Amino acid sequence: MTEIEQTGAEQQGAPSKEERGQAMACHLLALIGFIIPFGNLIGPLIMWVIKKDESSFVDDQGKEAVNFNITMLIAGFVCFLLTFVIIGAILLPILGIFWLVITIIAGLKANDGVAYRYPFTLRLIK
């Protein structure tokens, strides 16, 4: 695509390269959760709050990332409670792998300019 074609596409509503990068960051900042407790929610939330007024694409993807990570925190808590009846010990690692894979997929899709929708997500922030 030439520069003129890219500019035309951006004017028609396609997100710019910068917007795609920021949307990808909204998703991938959840990986901070490996280092900081509740970082999987704090990272996307901060990025979304800072950038939501600058781009509708970043606003949409930021809300999606925050909603997904809230859902995963709730599901993780339920799995933790279920460890007392053994089943949670099986479900918790499966949930963790699911979270990691879907978060990476969402980041890659956002970088491609696709408005990604997470599966099994409570849409708490509209």
Image: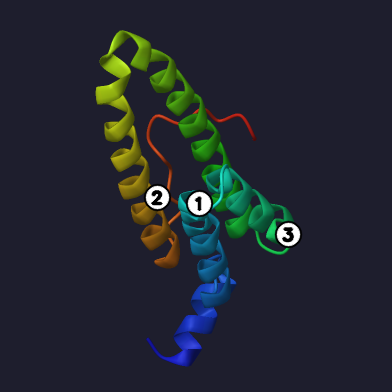
Q: Residue at x 37, y 86 (%)?
A: 1
* Image spot of residue 103 (x, y percent): 40, 50
Dot 3 or dot 1: first in sequence order is 1
Amino acid at pointer 2: Thr
Local crowd size for mark 3, using a 10 Å CA cut-off: few (<14), some (14–19), many (≥20) = few
Amino acid at pointer 1: Ala
Mark 1 and mark 2 in contact? Answer it, CB < 8 Å.
yes
Residue at image mark 2: 103
**Which label sits on residue 50?**
3
Quote the CA–CA distance across marks 3 and 2.
20 Å
Mark 3 and mark 2 in contact? Answer it, CB < 8 Å.
no
Local crowd size for mark 2, using a 10 Å CA cut-off: few (<14), some (14–19), many (≥20) = many
Dot 3 or dot 2: first in sequence order is 3
**Which label sits on residue 30?**
1
* Image spot of residue 14 (x, y percent): 51, 67
Q: Nearer the viewer, mark 3 or mark 1?
A: 1
Helix or strand or loop: what does disc 2 sit on? Answer: helix
* Image spot of residue 76 (x, y percent): 44, 28
Dot 1 or dot 2: first in sequence order is 1
Quote the CA–CA distance across marks 1 and 2.
8 Å
Helix or strand or loop: what does disc 1 sit on? Answer: helix
Work out whether residue 100 or residue 53 is closer to the camera in this orientation and state it. 100
* Image spot of residue 26 (x, y percent): 55, 57
Q: Is residue 43 above or below residue 80?
A: below
Q: Quadrant of the C terminus?
A: top right
Residue 22 shown left or right of residue 24 in the figure: right
**Which label sits on residue 52?**
none
Q: Nearer the viewer, mark 1 or mark 2?
A: 1
